[in-house]
Image (cartoon, helix red, strand yellow):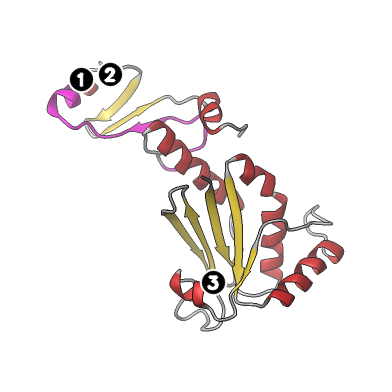
Amino acid sequence: GKWTILFSHPADFTPVCTSEFMTFASMDEEFKALNTQLVGLSVDGLYSHIAWLRTIKEKIEYKGMKNVEVHFPLIEDITMEVAKKYGMIQPGESSTKAVRAVFFIDPQGVIRTIIYYPLSMGRNFDELKRVLIGLQTADAFGVALPADWRPGDDVIVPTAGSCGTAKARMEGQEGEMTCYDWFFCTKKLAKADVEAKLGTTL
């Protein structure tokens, strides 16, 4: 009954991954408010995970984050079985490390979005949260979302299924819509309405 963000990282005790884990952990409550469970994965073992997460909590202070405790699950994938099944090992990057992959999985268990980052670059967490909110909004309201959409921006009304509907759209007879052509119509969707439907403050 929840959304899941399954994300892989190349290795424990590496700086980019550490910055990401601290950010994920700091945002854990924000993701929970969006009915979303975080699940991490690397090809390191359980004891490495434990030691690394302890080090993060006890020693690392970064961008105002300190004493950060990771509460979400972190999968050990020494055999690389999960990483290989999910396509987390990318040719040309490394044969023994999972890349920075992010899988957005809906409550029905369907993978809805996959984002890959190279080993050398950390993830954009603002974008990860925007994608999650966007997927939930599109599902909840039966709309599509334009480039750079944020809650409160206009949304795209799905293309009309018949000529009569298309004509009504062009003549503005379907309510508060703005049509740029028969295939491209938008309407207002208040941020408050999105928040009410998703059950959280954005």
Q: Is residue 114 left or right of residue 39?
A: left
Find out whether residue 28 is within the magenta segment: no
- Label 3 neighbourhood size at 10 Å, few (<14), some (14-19), many (20+)? many
Of all residues, the one furthest to the left in this rendering is 163
Residue 174 tag number: 2
For mark 3, what is the residue?
A: 99
Amino acid type, mark 3: Val
Is the residue 54 above or below the residue 97 in the image?
Answer: above
Q: Main secondary structure of the magenta part?
A: loop
Magenta residue span: 147-167
Q: Is residue 39 left or right of residue 21?
A: left
* Quadrant of res 54: bottom right
- Label 2 neighbourhood size at 10 Å, few (<14), some (14-19), many (20+)? few
State which mark lies toward you, 1 or 3: 3
Q: SS at mark 2?
A: loop
Marks 1/2: CA–CA distance: 6 Å
Marks 1/3: CA–CA distance: 48 Å
- The answer to whether one can see residue 148 in this image is no
Q: Nearer the viewer, residue 201 or 84?
A: 84
Q: Is residue 165 left or right of residue 192?
A: left
Amino acid type, mark 2: Glu
Nearer the N terminus, badge 2 or badge 3? 3
Q: Which residue is depicted at the point 49% across and 71% down?
A: 88
For mark 1, what is the residue?
A: 168
Of all residues, the one furthest to the bottom in this rendering is 95
